[in-house]
Amino acid sequence: MNIGIFTYGTRGDVQPYIALALGLIKNGHKVIIAAPENFKELVEGFEIAFHPLPGNVEEMMNGPEGQYLLKSENTIKLVKHFYKLLSQAKVPLRKSYIEAFNKVDFIIANAATIPITAAIAEKQNKKLAITYFMPPVVPTTEFPLADFDFLNFPLYNKLTYKLVHFLFWKFLKSEVNEFRQELGLPVLKENLLAYIDRQKPLDLYCLSSSLIAQPKDWDDNHKITGFLTVSQRETPGDYNDELNNWLEQGSKPLYMGFGSNGVGNTDKFINAISEVLNKTNERILFCTGWAKFDNLPVHDNLFVTKYVNHTAILPKCKAGIFHGGAGTLAAMLRNDLPVIIISFYTDQPTWGKIVERMQLGVHIPVKKFTAAKLISAIANVQKNQVKHRVAAIGQQIRNEAGLETAIREIEIFFQK
């Protein structure tokens, strides 16, 4: 099969698809990944065909307006800014999506691309499988939609999904129908998500069922598969003699990093790192990722780099401090690391709540983040009770065949 994978967003929205593409290629399929142009080197580094989509999310976040909104720590404004930039680039974006569609026969799309990919797939009569790396948005009576967990009973739970689906459609309705008209498709009068769901596409949540169990009232096309991970080789990262020597010179460090997550108020993180170094004996391996950190302290117990190879480095760490992205959370738990999630936006607060509820670590919303709370959290995640819980969940995740399950479901669906 000739398969196109379409994704848009940060590194966490691209990296799992590298695992999926490699698995599909191993099974004899031809695969191309269409993603923002700044991920070309990352994807092609795995010898996977790449189609560049216009835009650079790293530049969006580090631009003046992006930095201003990151410093405001206002999730809604930040998401609106992101969609505004996408809207401004909609003409070249749509053209590039269509060009990529013309190269493939079957489509795998992430959530952010649905307003575009669903329309083109319908126009070209190509099968569409949708994949998610966030808590479910499929209605269920078993639990409310993420961040609406004030109550939990069947009628309320179903209502939370209807409300968010309504707001989603209200926000995107104009542009979705504009594009459908460009393609010669009828205007949608019903919610896009409801319209797609009536067509019964394959709908995969690439998450661990040990963290979110699959609801019993879902239709058969909605499935929780397990996390997608690269089996033999992680994304390229810094792992040099200097880092190796530092790791061997003392006790296991804390891993701290926010990947491709934007960080606006870097000063309070720099202050927190300084406090930890001055008031404890902890060692910190700090990965700056996309964020711009100036004036970090110089200390024997601090090692600073941009990225690391998770496969090689995480087994050498004692706990993880990060933003709460699903992919990084999977990597931490797979390596039996208790976690401290400092959540910024989107699904990160939900993962933070899940981690706390399951006693796998500590959740600190970024607006409430302080050096004192970080020091307290570091002590809490090293308690035996947390370590035992993490080890149990880590074993379950290692036993899951998330990648194999996803590939099997995709092959069955596309061959129908």
Image: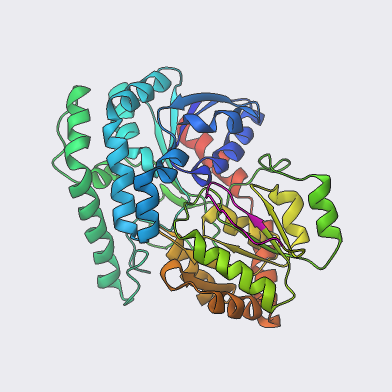
Residue at point 26%, 58% (across, down): 164
**Residue 210 in view of the camera:** no
Relative to 58, is 90 above or below? above
Q: Nearer the viewer, residue 362 or 69?
A: 69
* Image location of residue 335, percent across then percent down: 71, 60
* Image location of residue 53, percent across then percent down: 42, 28
* Image location of residue 114, percent across then percent down: 34, 39
Q: Is residue 215 magenta?
A: no
Displayed quadrant of residue 48: top right
Quadrant holding the C terminus: top left
Q: How many marks?
A: 0
Q: Nearer the viewer, residue 18 or 397?
A: 18
Residue at point 70%, 70% (across, down): 391
Left or right of 292: which side holds 379? right
Left or right of 73: which side holds 36? right
Left or right of 413: which side holds 218? left
* Image location of residue 281, percent across then percent down: 75, 75
Displayed quadrant of residue 377: bottom right
Relative to 320, is 359 above or below? below
Relative to 146, is 292 above or below? above
**Residue 82 in view of the camera:** yes
Q: Nearer the viewer, residue 201 or 291?
A: 291
Magenta-tinted stretch: 286-298
Dominant secondary-structure state across the stretch colored magenta: loop
Colour treatment of the image: rainbow
